[in-house]
Image: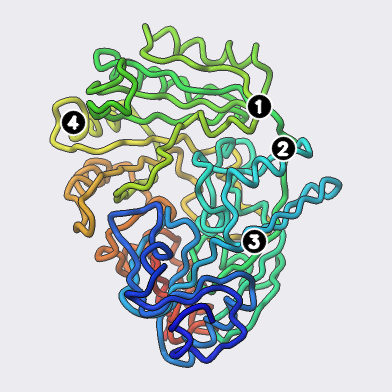
């Protein structure tokens, strides 16, 4: 052992450091990208490999303790107060098989590292918008990638999972195993993933970037985009962020303090075709920013330009059966310029391959949704659920068919069973609850949007 935590944990084979509250290194180890909510475990096991994870889970089960898992801390949902936190950020091995077009990754691998490793072989993972997000956590939530409408959920490209379950066993899962499909889409409810294998796609470049319109053009641009999105091929995935930029030096001068609509485009096709497809959006009017271009896939994170620094946030979402003119009007009434809600709105087009369930039958429902609206607020550290989130959800209720648990961040006090049930169809939740009772009857993996074990 590397510190005094060895006195409370009877696992001398742990290769990574172990921390208790107050010890040097504890605060650094629990820190993550999310700063509004922070784990405060009684014990941190900083795993270096799968055996460390297995030993930590076995110890927690023996002591009757809850288990939380953190690689990067982007998607923290329910913060631990006591129990065991398993930090997986040191498990960063990546193995690319270019002939099979697969990657085997450790639990702590970040998206940017996998993109770079795959690009060396002319391949790409189905990663999301941020290069600093942990790949495993992203896949456990389903994974809506930059090219999601063409390829579907990233989780459907997982080919094998190494999972430590509540009994301290290391299980190797493949499609067809009952835990395989249950693990993908449930955000860590069934154990700790130490490694997985996923299929890569032969993509080396994309056409994409942002078109940003100033306040007078926001409403028109949104309506044009709404109509335009129904006409584009599945090879084009787009989103729009509606926000007021803060008036701070870190923001480019032309954007400071402005309420804008920022359209994000990713197209897997020729530049000339991309230019033709986006012409109706450009015709809306002058842009504050227009950087659409062909780019190597290694630069695809610039399409969304997500913040790359830790900060506080909480978020909810609504999956919509349609995005009508009335939907947009209702949304802008509560969150448009001068409206009561102060939050970032992110509308992503779904459909295409996302609507088709794969052979592995992973735990992702509401596939008839055409759009998902995310609402992202910036609470103070430890704050309760911002009222803004509920206001937007209420405004969208007439068009809502459910929500994505992957896009609900922080505010763990609201993470009750009803919230989790709304992420799934009724029969899916019943199946998952039965599996939870079989594999984690004491619910030690409950620091998440929790599936309650069936009676």
Earlier residue among tags 4 and 3:
3
In the rendered structure, are the residues bearing label 1 and label 2 in contact, judged by CB atoms less than 8 Å apart?
yes
User: Could you classify mark 2 by the number of other residues whose Cα lies within 10 Å: few (under 14), some (14-19), or many (20 or more)?
Assistant: some
* Residue 338, position as x, y percentages in the image: 14, 27
Circle 3 — which element?
Answer: strand
The residue at which mark 2 appears reads as 119
**Left or right relative to 92: residue 86:** left
Earlier residue among tags 4 and 2:
2
Residue in front for this viewpoint, 27 or 393: 27
Residue in front for this viewpoint, 259 or 366: 259
User: Could you classify mark 3 by the number of other residues whose Cα lies within 10 Å: few (under 14), some (14-19), or many (20 or more)?
Assistant: many
* Residue 2, position as x, y percentages in the image: 52, 78
Marks 4/2: CA–CA distance: 44 Å
Q: Nearer the viewer, mark 4 or mark 2?
A: 2
Q: Nearer the viewer, mark 4 or mark 3?
A: 3
Marks 1/3: CA–CA distance: 25 Å
Q: Residue 106 — which label?
A: 3
Q: Quadrant of residue 408?
A: bottom left
Earlier residue among tags 1 and 4:
1
Earlier residue among tags 3 and 2:
3
The residue at which mark 4 appears reads as 333
User: Could you classify mark 4 by the number of other residues whose Cα lies within 10 Å: few (under 14), some (14-19), or many (20 or more)?
Assistant: some
| Residue 403 visible in image | no
* Residue 161, position as x, y percentages in the image: 66, 66
The residue at which mark 1 appears reads as 296
């Amino acid at each position: 052992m590397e510190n005094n935590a060895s006195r409370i944990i009877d696992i001398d084979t742990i290769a990574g450091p172990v921390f208790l509250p107050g010890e040097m290194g504890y605060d650094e180890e629990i820190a993550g990208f999310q700063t509004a909510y922070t784990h405060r475990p009684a014990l941190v096991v900083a795993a270096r490999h799968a055996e460390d994870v297995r030993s930590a889970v076995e110890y927690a089960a023996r002591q009757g303790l809850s288990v939380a898992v953190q690689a990067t801390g982007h998607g923290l949902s329910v913060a631990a107060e006591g129990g065991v936190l398993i930090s997986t950020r040191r498990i960063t091995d990546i193995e690319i098989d270019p002939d099979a077009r697969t990657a085997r990754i450790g639990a702590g691998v970040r998206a940017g590292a996998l993109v770079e490793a795959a690009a060396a072989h002319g391949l790409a993972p189905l990663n999301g918008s941020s290069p600093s997000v942990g790949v495993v956590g992203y896949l456990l939530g389903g994974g809506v990638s930059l090219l999601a409408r063409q390829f579907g959920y990233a989780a459907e490209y997982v080919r094998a999972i190494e999972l430590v379950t509540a009994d301290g066993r290391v299980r190797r899962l493949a499609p067809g195993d009952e835990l395989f499909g249950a693990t993908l889409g449930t955000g860590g409810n069934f154990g700790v993933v130490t490694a997985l294998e996923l299929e890569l796609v032969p993509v080396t470049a994309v056409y994409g970037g942002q078109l940003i319109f100033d306040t007078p053009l926001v409403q028109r641009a949104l309506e044009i985009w709404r109509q335009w999105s129904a006409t584009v091929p599945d090879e084009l995935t787009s989103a729009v962020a509606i926000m007021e930029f803060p008036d701070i030096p870190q923001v480019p001068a032309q954007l400071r303090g402005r309420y804008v609509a920022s359209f994000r485009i990713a197209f897997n096709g020729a530049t000339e075709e991309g230019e033709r497809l986006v012409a109706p959006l450009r015709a809306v009017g002058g842009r504050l920013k227009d950087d659409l271009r062909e780019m190597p896939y290694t630069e695809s994170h610039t399409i969304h330009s997500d913040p790359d620094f830790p900060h506080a946030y909480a978020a909810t979402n609504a999956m919509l059966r349609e995005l009508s003119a009335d939907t947009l009007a209702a949304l802008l009434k509560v969150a448009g310029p001068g409206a009561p809600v102060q939050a970032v709105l992110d509308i992503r087009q779904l459909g295409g391959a996302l609507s088709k369930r794969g052979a592995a039958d992973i735990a992702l429902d509401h596939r008839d949704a055409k759009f998902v609206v995310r609402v992202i607020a910036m609470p103070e550290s430890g704050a309760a659920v911002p009222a803004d989130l509920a206001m937007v959800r209420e405004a969208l209720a007439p068009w809502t068919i459910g929500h994505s648990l992957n896009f609900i961040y922080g505010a763990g006090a609201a993470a009750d069973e009803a919230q989790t049930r709304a992420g799934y169809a009724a029969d899916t939740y019943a199946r998952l609850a039965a599996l939870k009772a079989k594999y984690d009857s004491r619910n030690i993996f409950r620091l998440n949007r929790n599936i309650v074990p069936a009676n």
